Image (tube, coloured by chain):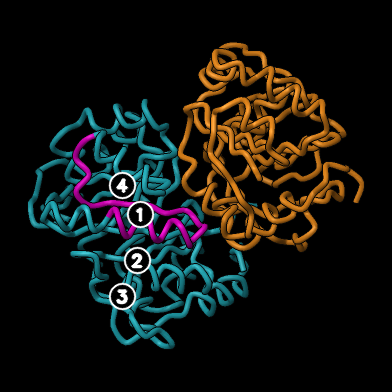
Amino acid sequence: MITKRIIPCLDVKDGRVVKGVNFLGLADVSSPVKLAEYYSKCGADELVFYDITASAEGRALFTDILRQVAERVFIPLTVGGGINTVDDFDRVLKCGADKVSVNSGAIRNPALIPAAAERYGSQCVVISADVKRVDGEYRVFAKGGREDTGMEAVSWIARCVANGAGEVVLNSIDTDGVKGGFDLEMLDAVCQAVNVPVIASGGAGCIQDFVTLFKALPKVDAGLAASIFHFGEVQISDLKRVLRENGITVRL
Amino acid sequence: MIAIIDYGVGNLFSLAHSLKAVGAQAVVTGDAKEISRAERVILPGVGAFGDAAKKLRETGLDTLVREIAGHGTPVMGICLGMQLLLDRSFEFGEHIGLGLIPGEVRPIAEVIPAELKIPHIGWNALDIRAPHPIFANVRPGDCVYFVHSYYGARCDESVIATAEYGAPLTAAVARGNVCGCQFHPEKSGDVGLGILKAFCEWDGDAAC
């Protein structure tokens, strides 16, 4: 049976990993290449790189680093951040990315997802949505969660999937950074609306949060987290062992 | 030297580097002479079967791959490349494949329960059905990475591994000196590298 995926997310700015501190047994914790190799060895099933650089120089540096990662790490790599055109897809795919995640770019230009899916296939196109509760409904936020688009989130995500997105990363702004567990209610709403893989993001604080996630919502395919992995609070090998002990299928 | 056949479909960056990582010398090429000279040949591919088969025909690489296979050179198809080794495909119409391994490409949806997601995407365990030299480094329970919506049907005794996804889907096939993986060894971590390494050491004899 297909295994549940555990995905560390690396925010990269000007060629360095942001938040990469206090890492056991790793000298240069802000090197995306070193961190990627480390996670791959620890059993990460996939890696997500978000390019949060604003400048063009930073972008070139990012693709350079992506190439170095893809030369050494042989697990699926997803890239997001600053993806606004099909040319942006092309740029990162040529450097070894397997999937490309779009967020604000798809909000600004609804034609981006169908165009990218037609050229590269749905398996390559990930819709990443930042979602927050506003006035009793789920709203899509743009620009890194700073701007309320006014769009209802579940129908927006379902529309992106209908247009060709092959996977959904659902990041709950409400639970993000709180470390009190994933947003099960929001995830359930999205899982019921789409039939492509759903990756839970935002709120993981401990191993038990992942157990709860996969037990409560068997339709969720993967759990994504950043700081708990980067700060060494949760080791991926320990996490997977506990998941297996709880009857959840994982790759060990 | 291993030739990774470049016929204009898919990204061969990771495949080339994964072969380098197992110590193999690999070249990405569409040049007939270079491909003919290679000790081993890999046929990669992502995207739709019809487009890929058309590109192989237009470049004459379909005939070349058949010839090479006929001479006993070890050949490995990966993902769509594996599907192209079969007789035909029913992805968006009907298309003729290379016919090097018996079987046809059909939608996964025909054989798996409706509640399972398509594509079959993620890490799944390999169930070895017949021992084969390319599995020399594979242990029971080892997982590899899949991304596909179609699968090899009616491959019968050519199936050497399956993956359970509501049904035992064809994960690898082999016949004589030709083999194919539905999964992506170049994206399957150490297990995938082990399979590529074994292919690089394989002389094309199917016996273990």
Q: Secondary structure at mark 1?
A: helix
Q: Earlier in the sequence, mark 3 or mark 2?
A: 2
- Residue where numbered disc 3 is placed: A227
Q: Give the chain of mark 1.
A: A
Which hue belongs to chain A? Answer: cyan
- Residue type at the position of mark 2: Phe
Give the spatial CA distance, label 3 vs label 4.
20 Å
Vertical comparison of B197 with B85: above or below = below
* Label 4 and label 2 in one chain: yes
Q: Give the chain of mark 3.
A: A
Q: Which chain is orange?
A: B
Q: Earlier in the sequence, mark 2 or mark 1?
A: 2
Pointer 2 and pointer 1: residues touching (CB < 8 Å)?
yes
Quick one: A245 or B148, which is closer to the camera?
Answer: B148
Q: Earlier in the sequence, mark 4 or mark 2?
A: 4
Q: Earlier in the sequence, mark 4 or mark 1?
A: 4
Crowd tier of the residue under label 4, counting other residues whose Cα lies within 10 Å: few below 14, some 14–19, many 20 or above? many
Q: Tell me the tag on residue A182.
A: 2
Residue A67 among those drawn in magenta = yes
Crowd tier of the residue under label 2, counting other residues whose Cα lies within 10 Å: few below 14, some 14–19, many 20 or above? many
Q: Give the chain of mark 4.
A: A
Magenta extent: A63-85
Q: Secondary structure at mark 3?
A: helix
